[in-house]
């Protein structure tokens, strides 16, 4: 875990959190993080790995750094996405309701 991988992972999580609200509630499109395997995040990651990382040459991210970036970004995606917000609150209230 290097500093740049942690910084990039936190930036990725912040970007997903910001874009998720804008996409879901302002534009009212399909959920950006609608399930446990968000295509928007994995697609961006694949594009970064194939299109941008090879051109960085000397400063390219290693596999371990890419794993840290992806883990932090996916962890941040659970908060604004459908996984935590749509399912946690009803799960907490349903025992009282029943």
Image (spheres, helix red, strand yellow):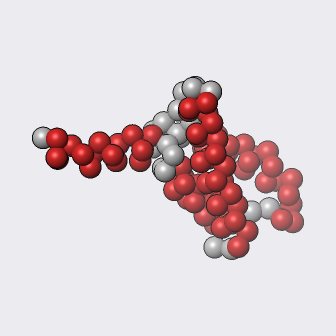
Front residue of this view, candidates 94 and 56: 94
Q: At 59% across and 48% down in the image, what residue appears?
A: 17
Residue that appears at 86% across and 53% down = 55
Depth order, front residue of 76/37: 76
Quadrant in which the N terminus appears: bottom right
Q: Is residue 76 left or right of residue 86?
A: right
Q: Quadrant of residue 43?
A: top right
Between 34 and 62, the residue placed more toward the observer is 34
Tag count = 0
Measuring from the top left, give residue 50's x and y in whole percent.
75, 46
Percent position of residue 48, x then y: 74, 48
Residue 5, x across and y down, in percent: 69, 66
- List x then y, in percent, for residue 3: 70, 73
Can residue 40 be spotted in the picture? no
Residue 60 visible to the viewer: yes
Name of the residue lying farthest toward the left: 98
Figure quadrant of the C terminus? top left
Q: Residue reaching furthest bottom? A: 2
The foreground one among 55 and 33 is: 33
Q: Residue at x 64, y 45 (%)?
A: 18
**Relative vertical location of residue 61 with respect to residue 79 in this rendering, above or below:** below
- What's the residue at 62%, 27% (across, down)? 27
Left of 63 or right of it: where is 60? right
């Amino acid at each position: 875990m290097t500093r740049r991988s942690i910084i990039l992972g936190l930036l990725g999580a912040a970007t997903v959190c910001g874009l998720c609200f804008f996409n879901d509630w302002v534009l009212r499109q399909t959920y950006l993080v609608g399930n446990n395997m968000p295509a928007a995040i994995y697609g961006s990651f694949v594009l970064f790995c194939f299109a941008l990382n090879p051109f960085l040459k000397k400063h390219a991210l290693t596999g371990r750094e890419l794993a840290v970036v992806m883990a932090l970004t996916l962890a941040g995606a659970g908060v604004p996405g459908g996984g935590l917000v749509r399912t946690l609150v009803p799960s907490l209230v349903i025992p009282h309701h029943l």
